Amino acid sequence: MKKIFLSSIIVSSLFSACTSSTEEKTNKEYTAEQIAEESKKVSAFFDRAFDAKIDRDPMQQSIFGIKKDYDKWQNISESNAQKEVEISKGYLDSLHANFKIEALDEQSKISYRLFEKACEDVIANYNWHLFDYPINQMGGLHTEIPAFLINVHKIENVKDAEAYVSRLNGISVLFDQLLENLKLREARNIIPPKFVFPYVLNDCKNITSGKPFDQSGTVNPLMEDFMKKVNELKDCKGEEKQALIEKASIALKSSVKPAYDKLSVYFLELEKKATTDDGIWKVKDGDAYYDFALKQTTTTALTADEIHEIGLKEVARIHDEMRVIMKKVNFKSDNLQEFFDFMREDKQFYYANDEAGKEAYRVKAVKIIDDMKKELDKLFLTKPKADIVVKPVEAFREKSAGGAFYEDPAIDGSRPGRYYINLYNMADQAIYQMEALAYHEGIPGHHMQIAIAQELKGIPKFRMYGGNTAYIEGWALYSELVPKEIGFYQDPYSDFGRLAMELFRAARLVVDTGIHRKKWSREKALAYFKENTPNPEGDNKKEIERYIVWPSQATGYKIGMNKIIELRENAKKKLGDKFDIRQFHDVILTSGPVPMDILEEMVDSWVAKKK
């Protein structure tokens, strides 16, 4: 209650502090001084709103290196979700009442529109906020909480250790709120498909196994993490360390285990109601939700049918490019499906599924990123200060986690960006896709975009974080192509891997819309992938299961990439010899993540100035 009350005070003071300085202006002509002053005031408004939001979110505070509520979790209750909507409505009213967009400089006008849209999205999203699956095989609090404690919660002193223990004890309340949210969905018959349940139950079992939960030879990952961090403390004596470790052990047994057990019991009961229908169409108003989700994901007005058709055309185009590579490597046949089978099955394309094979993959991934770092001056004027490391996905979640993903660096510079690679089954990690995957997740992909955004100066804080799928994933997919243009992918099989990954994203347009709009079964989706992509069956299965629990999310990649390429080619055509790829990338990356329509305006403005 105290935290909610404090947030209300912050919001109220924010509104009262923003009494309009433009209210009395009826003239649309503003002096340079007035524009500068008004832009400064609106930026301050945005930053106060952002800071107030962080003040309401202890987990985000920790990610930012703030230890104000280091012993707490965020409030995920339904009542708090409603309060967040009211806060956004208040921000929107204040923005419109107190600031005139025509009185702002160009960057502030963009900020105004982005902030306005962000508030409108919070309000609109609330109408659909129960249409997702907050616990699924891809993630959810059941796996995010241990990953957060292990990777984000640093222990630099005794107080930090005590905060860690408090967070362990707080998991029981957090999971009670989670169960409340799941039951609200159950009441609307929004229940994950049947295949999700074994994954979730297995993850819960993994997280509550090992010492101190049982007498097996293994140590629980949370217990192991806490012990390691506490034992490294230099300002803490042995007895004090042991006392802290005992507190953590008690918290794990008395709070964490019961919370996970309660979630598991609920999921076992919920599983009885689950069906094998996979598309969101199975839910009342599911079609309307999918239309909304596509607009949010792609930031375009493209319909499901239009996206489906784009996917089919892109698949056909990429198939033609792959046939060129088939000839280059002198493949025995001109049958593309036979070549796919060869790429799936030939052992030369996969490391051994043992510790040596997994380490060899990791080492090569590091080298790919290190080699790319040396060439960045050819492509970029702005480069991130934050470094990047390659890490295997932790054992407790590797069975259900995706094939690869990226985690942002710490804002305070204390933690590098992380490229996570899932090495659970090496048959799902083809060597020929390593280059493209490292460029996508690392450099010049997610790490360049996200780290540069976090390090930007002169724009409001809210523009440095977050974003939309089309921009973020569109850039990462575009980043798979860019290295080829400066001489990478010398191995034709590796270049095939690049095309295979682009093909995968094109096929996603077909399969995502197929499942959620055209009522495709999981079997039909699997058959489409097998016929049209070279990806291993296990990889295809995981991907399709991902699309099922994240309707529309997978469509953002190819739609975003296509838009960035379209903007680049248009700029090249208009500028001719004046086109500079480094400047183009600066336009894309140095304003933070933006919707596709605003990105197009920014590129058009740059082109006009260059001309």
Image (cartoon, helix red, strand yellow):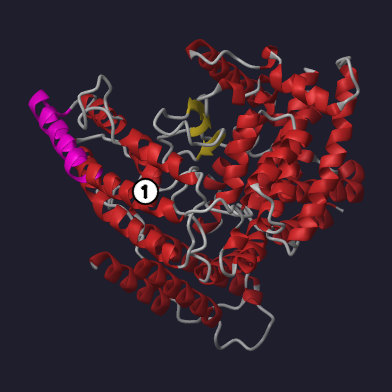
Quick one: SS at disc 1?
A: helix
Is residue 545 positioned above or below 7 on the image? above
Is residue 395 positioned above or below 475 on the image? above
Whether residue 482 can be seen here = no
Q: Position of residue 511 (x, y in %)?
A: 71, 47
Whether residue 532 can be seen here = yes
Q: Quadrant of residue 255?
A: top left
Report the span colored magenta: 235-256
Is residue 60 positioned above or below 204 on the image? below
In which quadrant will I find the N terminus?
bottom left
Q: Position of residue 467 (x, y in %)?
A: 58, 54
Q: Residue drawn at (50%, 48%), measured in percent from left and top?
A: 194
Q: Position of residue 396 (x, y in %)?
A: 39, 31
Q: Which residue occupies the foreground of this view, 218 or 236? A: 218
Q: Residue drawn at (50%, 43%), measured in percent from left and top?
A: 138
Image side of residue 300 versus residue 185, left or right: right
Q: Is residue 248 magenta?
A: yes
Q: Which residue occupies the foreground of this view, 427 or 79? A: 427
Residue hosting label 1: 268
Please, what is the three-letter code of the amino acid marked with disc 1?
Leu
Q: Residues within 10 Å of mark 1 (few under 14, many from 20)?
A: some
Q: Is residue 416 magenta?
A: no
Q: Residue drawn at (31%, 73%), measured in percent from left and top?
A: 9
Image side of residue 401 versus residue 267, left or right: right
Q: Which residue occupies the foreground of this view, 312 or 24? A: 312
Image side of residue 248 versus residue 239, left or right: right
Q: Position of residue 530 (x, y in %)?
A: 73, 34
Q: Residue drawn at (52%, 62%), measured in percent from left and top?
A: 131
